[in-house]
Amino acid sequence: MFNVQDIRKDFPILSRKVNGKPLAYFDNAATSQTPQQVIDAIVDYYANYNANIHRGVHTLSQEATDLYEQARQKIQAHFNAKFSHEIILTSGATHSINLVANGFSSLLKKGDDIIVSALEHHSNIVPWQMLCERTGANLKVIPMNEDGELVMSVFDNLLSKNTKLVFLNHISNALGTINPIEYVIEKAHQVGSAVLVDGAQACPHIKPDVQALDVDFYVASAHKMCGPTGVGMLYGKEAWLNKLPPYQGGGEMIAEVTFEKTTYADLPHKFEAGTPNIAGGIVFGAAIDYMNNIGFDAIAAYEKELLDYATQKLLAIDGLKIYGTSKNKTSVISFNLENIHPYDVGTILDKLGIAVRTGHHCAQPIMDYYGIPGTIRASLAFYNTKEEIDTLVEGVKKAKMMLS
Ligand code: 7TS
């Protein structure tokens, strides 16, 4: 049974005060909070297992290696990848995207097309622009509409035999829109293009099945799903990962090194140069366990309830406009008050202990589309409550009164 008050007891930070008020944390899309089970796993690693992995004959190193590889298997099972070596542990979604973008340098030529969506976080735009500069490929954009949805009829027309890669997020960080990735994957595959899905904002809410999706690459960050910062994953189909060259050179990614020639290790090690975030990788596994114990169906149902409640309450405030009104959206609410700068509202909310993000949310093209400098974003998680939403709504009303 889903009981939010019991769940909240797992998160020590949720009982602290900010500016003398109980914290109401609504910046979950930036980073999620960390349950005690995950904090304990970090302490356990450093207290009992700390050693470098894949290189020692000694017991500690072997134990740490086993834990790290078990975490990889846990991640494999969670995303339903066919092989554990299709899971590359990275420093996060940004690293994962850059790894693929860098690899495609050797696969693209002038005149090839790559397609992005208008709803992307900068980390799924800039690495591809850099790739286009290196290769002469063209970057094409699937546009958005007023509701913050992608215009799929334009996407259909952008696709051609020149399309080599399509990349878009599963869920928009700025608006919460759930994108029709199944359709995108099917259509892109029909013209022989690969697809990368940025799942950074989807993984806190749903459990993606990469084989059912038939997606070529899928990326995620642990810190948005109750895990630590500085660790994430890249899923890639084995054939694609074998086709891509290594991203970074260094220790642990080689088979043999001489000054004449170096050969590379097999997957996944080919993409994991240097000492990784060992504790982070292991604890990523613990975070996945934590979320699965609560259950993604229960999380989705509860968050939908919170989203509907918050949307209705906020819309009752005169002059408040919500950006991102797709029926198919998750628990992110981006909004503005008429004639008031989002930053000013965010500052007043902070004084009341309410944490929201204000600004362009690293998604400037979306703000440009709406002709606004930014929004106030309340992103909800399964440990938020209706009472906290009431506090937010009262805070927004107060800010409106003070700033009008
Ligand atoms: N992709 C999406 C869709 C994101 O929302 C983010 C981070 C990233 C990629 C990058 O993830 P990282 O872990 O590599 O940094 N999004 C946000 C946000 O919305 N507010 O702060 C970070």
Image (spheres, helix red, strand yellow):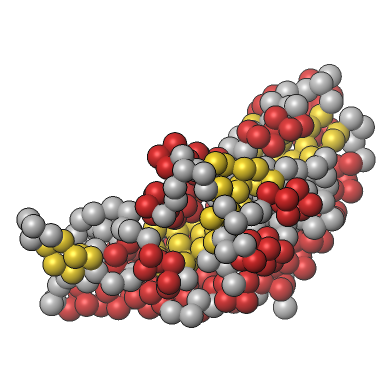
Question: Residue drawn at (25%, 77%), measured in percent from left and top?
Answer: 63
List x then y, in percent, for residue 286: 46, 71
Dividing the picture into quadrants, the one containing residue 145 is: top right
Seen in the image, is 311 located left or right of residue 158? right
Dividing the picture into quadrants, the one containing residue 125 is: top right
Q: Residue furthest left?
A: 259
284 to 231, vertically: above or below: below
Residue 118 visible somewhere in the drawing: yes
From the viewer's side, name the closer residue of 396 and 194. 194
Q: Which corner quadrant holds the N terminus?
A: bottom right
311 to 185, vertically: above or below: above
List x then y, in percent, for residue 185: 64, 64
From the viewer's side, name the closer residue of 372 and 243. 243
Seen in the image, is 219 located left or right of residue 366? left
Question: Residue drawn at (70%, 32%), measured in percent from left and top?
Answer: 367
Count how many numbered circles sit on residues in the image: 0
Q: Which corner quadrant holds the C terminus?
A: top right
List x then y, in percent, for residue 16: 58, 48
Seen in the image, is 42 located left or right of residue 307? left
Question: Residue drawn at (75%, 27%), measured in percent from left and top?
Answer: 371
Question: Residue drawn at (54%, 61%), measured in percent from left and top?
Answer: 194
List x then y, in percent, for residue 359: 64, 31
264 to 14, vertically: above or below: below
Dividing the picture into quadrants, the one containing residue 342 is: top right
Residue 7 visible somewhere in the drawing: no
